[in-house]
């Protein structure tokens, strides 16, 4: 049976539950889907995940019934095409500054005539259950090219970035963004200046008809970003969830919690 596309799922009546995978073990990603996350992003920028681990992680997420998202390292736009070929539903590009950056990324994400994605989606076709032709003709619309807004340059160029053909949405990194906004380089993912900038990003993205997401390091931040109007906000990471649960269990046993 053909599954609902990620684009359609994101337009549903409640925000999709998005988990964040930093670990290279496919079981960890699969467990997050089975625990209730409807989508999981594999983080090739800051996580301990390389291109060798990526296809196995993407397949594990999809086999468990989740949408598979991936973040590439800064500027490595060519790896976006490979992640799509391995079944990613969305690729997120960090530290985008200008419309030219966004255009370069989009060109690796979309098949001609919209872009220059090279043809070879054998693995994505297997995972999708579609025919090769059906995958090729639907991929530009069903997979999402999402750029991160997390610098002063990106904020200044937001309208131009949102207008780039092939860019389906934006994703805010509140840590980098708050560091960029702070005079002394201090992170503050819930500082008033960060929240005000994020509210503007969400509003402009929605006005442009684009998806807007944000990285939520914990439940409080995820809730606050959703309240600002983001389409989705991720929730914690596999590493933080394991560490937090371990700390809580130890504290409970030792009566120090
Ligand atoms: C940020 O907050 O800057 C991120 O990129 C989240 O990983
Ligand atoms: Mg960042």
Image: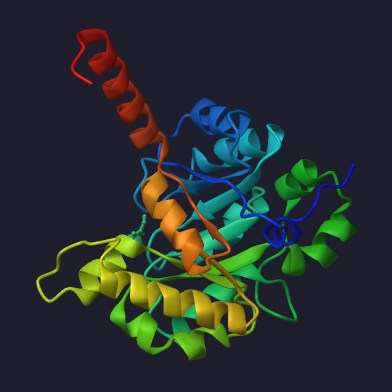
**Residue name at image x 66 percent, y 78 percent:** 115
**Residue name at image x 49 percent, y 62 percent:** 227
What count of labels does the image hold?
0
Ligand 2, image quadrant it occupies: bottom left
**Residue name at image x 62 percent, y 37 percent:** 61
Q: Is residue 247 visible?
A: yes
Q: Is residue 152 left or right of residue 160?
A: left
Q: Quadrant of residue 111?
A: bottom right
Residue lying furthest top: 253
Q: Is residue 189 left or right of residue 90?
A: left
Q: Is residue 217 left or right of residue 142?
A: left
Q: Quadrant of the N terminus?
A: top right
Q: Is residue 103 visible?
A: no
Q: Quadrant of residue 10?
A: bottom right
Q: Quadrant of the C terminus?
A: top left
Q: Tell me where residue 18 appears, x and y as whole percent.
A: 55, 47
Q: Tell me where residue 205 appears, x and y as whole percent.
A: 55, 78
């Amino acid at each position: 049976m053909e599954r609902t596309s990620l684009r359609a799922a994101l337009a549903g009546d409640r925000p999709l539950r998005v988990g964040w995978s930093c670990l290279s073990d496919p079981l960890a990603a699969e467990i997050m889907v089975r625990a209730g996350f409807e989508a999981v992003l594999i983080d090739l920028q800051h996580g301990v995940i390389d291109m060798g681990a990526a296809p196995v992680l993407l397949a594990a997420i999809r086999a468990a019934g989740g949408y598979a998202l991936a973040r590439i390292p800064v500027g490595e736009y060519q790896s976006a095409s490979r992640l799509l070929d391995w079944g990613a539903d969305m690729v997120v590009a960090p530290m985008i500054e200008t419309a030219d950056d966004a255009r370069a990324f989009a060109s690796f994400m979309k098949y001609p005539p919209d872009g220059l994605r090279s043809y070879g989606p054998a693995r994505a076709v297997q995972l999708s259950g579609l025919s090769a032709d059906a995958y090729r003709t639907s991929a530009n619309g069903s997979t999402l090219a999402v750029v991160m807004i997390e610098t002063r340059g990106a904020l200044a160029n937001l309208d131009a970035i949102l207008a780039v053909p092939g860019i389906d949405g934006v994703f805010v990194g509140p840590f980098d963004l708050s560091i960029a906004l702070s005079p002394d380089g201090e992170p503050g993912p819930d500082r008033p200046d960060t929240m005000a900038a994020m509210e503007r990003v969400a509003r402009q993205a929605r006005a442009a008809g684009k998806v807007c997401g944000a990285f939520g390091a914990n439940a409080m931040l995820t809730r606050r970003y959703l309240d600002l109007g983001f389409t989705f906000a991720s929730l914690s990471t596999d590493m933080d969830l394991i560490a937090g649960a371990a700390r809580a269990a130890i504290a409970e046993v030792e009566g120090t919690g």
